[in-house]
Image: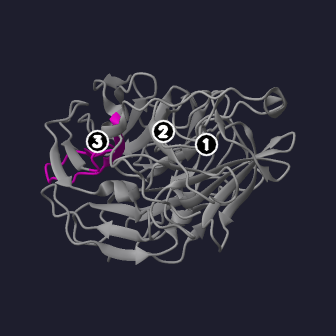
Amino acid sequence: MPKRTLPFATLAAAAAVVASVVCLPTAQAAGRPDFQLPAPCGETWAASTYSKHQPAYSVDLNYYPEDTGRPVVASAAGTVTVADSAGGWAGNHVRIDHGGGWTTHYAHLSSTAVTPGATVAAGQMIGRVGNTGNSTGPHLHFEQTLNGVGQPAVFDGTAYSYSDRNITSNNCGSPEPASPAPVSSVGDLTGDGKPDLLARASTGAKTLWLYPGLGNGKFGDRIDNGGWGSINQLSGVGDITGDGRSDVLAVEKSSGRLWVYPGQTDGHLGARIDNGVGWNSMRISGAQDLNGDGKGDLLAMETETGNLYLYPGLSNGHFGERVQIGTNWDSMSVAVGAGDLTGDGRNDVVAVEEESGKLLVYPGLGDGKLGARIEAGTGWDTMSSVSGSGDYTGDGKNDIVARQNDGKLYVYPGLGAGKFGARIDNGAGWNFDN
């Protein structure tokens, strides 16, 4: 329901507030799932409510200093029963059935990342914080219900006291990364002159598969590149090792270490190159040459500030000193290098605006900077992955590849002016298991 004004302005100012512990009545606790805060592991969120908050025992959750676009994760394992726009007070929302009559409800989302019938793990990303429906500001409306009746919320075994409190998430069972790249365009890794596609399985060993591009907007038989379960960000990138072949970027989940994997010509990857730690605070994307020096580059959005940085490739598998090229890029759910989409010979960046769902093309100026954006479409908040790395259709113009939340994959042919033609269907099942 509508967000009320909280009595504390920033999380830092209220960090000393300690959540009250309320003992649970035995009857109430019986059979209750081990509900956790619906926020990524380790994050601290502000919980609040107000008089006559409906449905009963609802909780409003905020992350300071900025809510919009923050990942929302499943409070406990279960099956998604609703994932859509309610067209009413809840806006975009998700409801999860946890068995035994227990459900959780997540409302006012800017976008959803799951579909009805999907099985989700505790800590798995299901959507992003928004301001849809009957809401007066970005926040997450959250409910725990039993047999359709609202119940006092419990997080990690502690009952919420229904006063203004900060709560730190212990939702660490099976967290999904804040900005996963399970499907990513990549340049030619098979030696046939056509760009290819990387896709990582979502379960098991999380195998990384390479799908060779066929030059007609379709893909050939996949090539196994082993288990990548330790990786939480993945992106194709231009040549940053100086061998003339496209490469792959990956961030290791446990350490935040950035690795460069040199591309080969047989659909496999070479020995990785260490680029240091600290990259879990960044949302990364590889790019073709953006600064005009002939080398691939790295785009990184700093999640804390929303600043966008360009890290120039050095041809030795490493990067030079970063240059800030934008602000407020945390308003984008996707921001990736995508080759030349405007037909001027310079490589560009494509982004999806979180709040509006608009697809935007930012023309590269050839010096690492970006020009005035071009609106290329709406409704792109239904896409869980967007990337671009070359001409997939064989017409001499660069294209983009997008996967819908329901697992359908499409190639969108570039028209050479920051616009796109009728999409090419590559079928469903791209939210695949191992």
Classify 80 as above or below 223: below
Residue 222 disc label? 1
Question: Within 10 angstroms of label 1, few (less than 14), some, or many (20 or more) residues?
Answer: some
Q: How is the image coloured?
A: one colour
Q: Image point 48% across, 39% down: which residue?
A: 165
**Horizontal side of residue 177 vs 347, given as left or right:** right
Task: Give the foreground label among 2 and 3.
Answer: 2
User: CA–CA distance between discs 1 and 3?
Assistant: 22 Å
354 or 32: which is nearer to us?
Answer: 32
Q: Please state, as top left, top right, bottom left or bottom right, where the C terminus lies in the image.
A: top right
Q: Are marks 1 and 3 in contact (CB under 8 Å)?
A: no
185 or 74: which is nearer to us?
Answer: 74
Task: Give the foreground label among 1 and 2.
Answer: 2
| Helix, strand or loop at mark 2 | strand
Residue tagged 3: 239
Q: Quadrant of residue 279?
A: top left
Q: Image point 36% across, 38% down: which residue?
A: 14
Q: Quadrant of residue 364?
A: bottom left
Residue 358 is situated, as x and y percent measured from the top left of the image, at 43, 71
| Helix, strand or loop at mark 3 | loop
Residue 300 is situated, as x and y percent measured from the top left of the image, at 29, 45
147 or 206: which is nearer to us?
Answer: 147
Q: Please state, as top left, top right, bottom left or bottom right, where the N terminus lies in the image.
A: bottom right
Regarding residue 104, the answer to whether it shows in the image is yes
Residue 165 disc label? 2
Which range is magenta?
Answer: 281-306
User: CA–CA distance between discs 1 and 2?
Assistant: 49 Å
| Helix, strand or loop at mark 1 | loop
Residue 282 is situated, as x and y percent measured from the top left of the image, at 33, 39
User: CA–CA distance between discs 2 and 3?
Assistant: 49 Å
Question: Within 10 angstroms of label 3, few (less than 14), some, or many (20 or more) residues?
Answer: many
Residue type marked 2: Arg
